[in-house]
Amino acid sequence: MIFENLDQLPTTFGNDKKAPCPHQRRRSNMMLNPLNLKHLNSIDKSEADMITLNLEDAIAPGRKKEALHNIALFLSHLEASKSCIIVRVNPLDAGGEEEIVFLNEFGFDAVRVAKVRNQTEIARALTLLAPDKELHISLETKEAFASLATLRIDERLTVANLGILDLLASLGLPQSIVQIGNPTIDYILSKFLVDAKTAGIHPISFMFQEYNDTETFRRWCEREKTMGFESKACMGPKQVAIANEIFGISSEALARAEHIKARFEAEASHGNNGFMDERYGIFIDEPIYRDALLTLERKE
């Protein structure tokens, strides 16, 4: 916990500035409302790989300054966290620019800009953002959806989060189609995944907002993993636990990757880049070897 007593919070900002996130795990991205002080107070103990402090659509206009102040207060007294801490600001023309400038001096890992549409807005955000912080975007508009593969104009843009409900509204499609197996949703997920990967951006799939329906959330995670996703937006620790489990790497997968790596490198040293492997009953060549390296890279 950051503070022992939430009834006696400091009246001034502190001087703590947590170190940058020490890992690249992105299995779970948990959204938190900064008006909930109890939740803010536990960000140093969370099991989520990523925590997003939300200033945008979950916060009423009259309380956005209060939410921003809460984020700054808790961050300025946060000594360490094993989660990557992100602040989701409002669209640039709706307060986001001022929020980025204000937050730059505090210790966190990335700013996530809502309702991004094009390269110009990304360039504006990068100009405002402190150079030690990453830029993440919420993909919620049809313009960004159409041009995602071309949006990475700077290496500090590292992550795109799919805001499925806002995107559907932008496309003029009903939310009722968000069903497992719906072909339009499958297309949106596939295009988002491939375009993000093409651009060198890490894609995070959408938030399932029926928090207590953990069975359906698990089914979404399992389906998205088969598509190639490695990350899921989460609402609370129940979903975090499921996402961490499903998008984690099993001991069996690691053992297989380590075996393939060792066998290929041993055979390649003798000029043999393609051979049968009796342990797994597969033909190992360079593509199989590269996939094993990718698995081991995700472990690191």
Image (cartoon, rainbow, N blue to C red):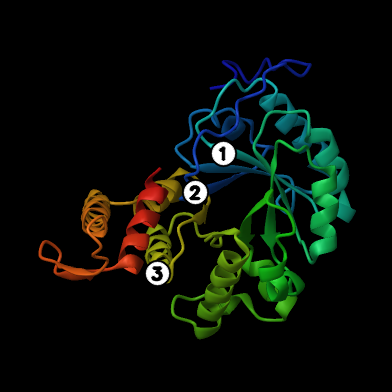
Q: Nearer the viewer, mark 3 or mark 1?
A: 1
66 to 90, vertically: above or below: above
The CA distance from mark 1 to mark 2 is 9 Å
- Residue 148 is tagged as none
**Quadrant the C terminus occupies:** top left
What residue sits right under mark 2 in the picture? 26
Mark 2 crowdedness (10 Å alpha carbons): few <14, some 14-19, many ≥20? many
Element type where label 2 sits in the image: loop
Q: Are marks 1 and 2 in contact (CB under 8 Å)?
A: yes
Q: Amino acid at mark 3?
A: Arg
Q: Work out whether 143 lies above or below 201.
A: below
Q: Residue 139: x and y, percent?
A: 68, 64
Q: Nearer the viewer, residue 244 or 289?
A: 289
Q: Which residue has dot 3 on it?
A: 223
Residue at position x 57%, y 34% in the image:
39
Count of numbered labels shown in the rendering: 3
Where in the figure is residue 261, as x and y percent of width and height? 27, 54
Which x, y percent locates residue 83? 52, 36
- The numbered dot on residue 84 is 1
Q: Residue at x 61, y 32 (%)?
A: 40
Among all residues in the image, which is located at the extreme left?
A: 278
Taking depth in this image into account, of 41 and 104 the one nearest to the observer is: 104
Question: In percent of the image, x 70 and y 60: which residue is there?
Answer: 152
> Of marks 1 and 2, which one's residue comes earlier in the chain?
2
* Mark 2 or 3, nearer chain start: 2
Q: Are marks 2 and 3 in contact (CB under 8 Å)?
A: no
Is residue 179 rendered to the left or right of residue 67?
left
